Structure formats: structure tokens, C-alpha cells
Amino acid sequence: MRSMWNSYILKTISLFGLVLFVLGCNKVERFNKRLSGNWTIEQFQFTNQNGLSYYYPVEGEIIFTPEDDTSGKYSLDYSYVVDGNTIQNSESGRYVFAYGDQEFYDLYRTKDGIQDTIKNARVILLTKTDLRTEMTEFIGRRTFVFVK
């Protein structure tokens, strides 16, 4: 009787593990599909290396175009005003979800003709209509709120 019980528990745990594995594999793919499309910037925050945060009036958008389950292309164009001066920013490149996780991604970008990489950019929130993401660079952290 004990052997049958152990066999039943082992089969149940194995089946449960298989279901979690299959669902987990599709999580990043579903996330990538939800990320796809044009997003309008609603809010822009810059936090410098000293930890001081500034919110700037902003206009622009980001476009995510998935190419496979875990990566794709992006284009980010925006302008914001600092002390009466308008600053334009335009970059594009590839994004790749890091660690098989949908929270962290790496950006392989071209900005002002220079290629570089932002490691461990982070999606803080993603719904069907809202996206909050942050990108940390050597000059500080950019935090964006987007709407679809």
C-alpha cells in the first residue's frame, strides 16, 4: 500500500512539475507579445548618479517589434525640456530578455551613431495599456511611463 501511495505522489509531482515547466517557457513569449507595438511616453524621470530625481515634460514614443520569443527590435524617440531648452533623443537597436526572465532585458543600441549596450534594463510594470521601464547607464537612470 505504501509503494502505491509513493508512486501516486511521485506521478502527481512529476505532472505538476511538467505543467509548471510548460507554462514557464511560454511566459516570456506571452510577455514579448504584450510588449509589442507603439507606446506613447506619458512620463519621463531622470535620476542622476547622486540619486537626485528630475521629472521633465516629454513627448515621444517607443516601438517594440518582436522577432522571436525572447528578443526583437526597438526604436525610442523622444524630446524633453530642461531649463527652456529642448533636448532630442533618438536610439534604436535590439532588445533581448536576460536570464530567461521577462523582467530584465539588455539593449544593444545605436545612439548618435555610436553602438553600445545597456545591461539589465528593467520592466517594472506591463499591462495591456501601461508600461513602466527603467534603463540604467553610466550617467544615471531613465525611467519611463508609457501608454498604448
Image (spheres, rainbow, N blue to C red):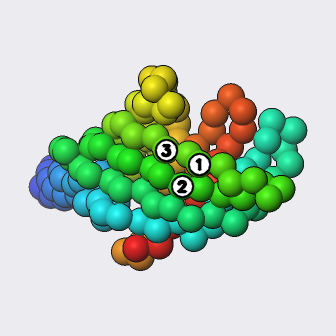
Q: Closest to the observer: 93 or 1? A: 93
Identify which amino acid the numbered label 3 is placed on. Ser
Q: CA distance from mark 2 to mark 1?
A: 6 Å
| Quarter containing the N terminus | bottom left
Q: Which residue is mark 2?
A: 78
Alpha-carbon neighbours of circle 2 within 10 Å: few (<14), some, or many (≥20)? Answer: some
**Can you give x and y, in whole percent of width and height, for residue 20 in the image?**
25, 55
Local secondary structure at mark 2:
strand
Marks 2 and 1: CB-CB under 8 Å?
yes
Instruction: Give the mark, 2 or 3, whose residue is nearer the N terminus.
Output: 2
Identify which amino acid the numbered label 2 is placed on. Tyr
Identify which residue is drawn at 49% across, 33% down. 111
Local secondary structure at mark 3:
strand
Is residue 24 visible to us here? Answer: no
Is 105 left or right of 44, judged from the image as shown?
left
Is 23 left or right of 83, judged from the image as shown?
left
Q: Which residue is mark 3?
A: 90
Local secondary structure at mark 1:
strand
**Can you give x and y, in whole percent of width and height, for residue 148 in the image?**
40, 73
Q: Which mark is residue 88?
A: 1
Identify which amino acid the numbered label 1 is placed on. Gln
Identify which residue is drawn at 48% across, 52% down. 77
Q: Quadrant of residue 73?
A: top left
**Can you give x and y, in whole percent of width and height, for residue 6 in the image?**
20, 51
Marks 3 and 1: CB-CB under 8 Å?
yes
Q: Quadrant of residue 19?
A: bottom left
Identify which residue is drawn at 76% across, 47% down. 47
Alpha-carbon neighbours of circle 1 within 10 Å: few (<14), some, or many (≥20)? Answer: few
Q: CA distance from mark 3 to mark 1?
A: 7 Å
| Residue occupying the far front of the picture | 85
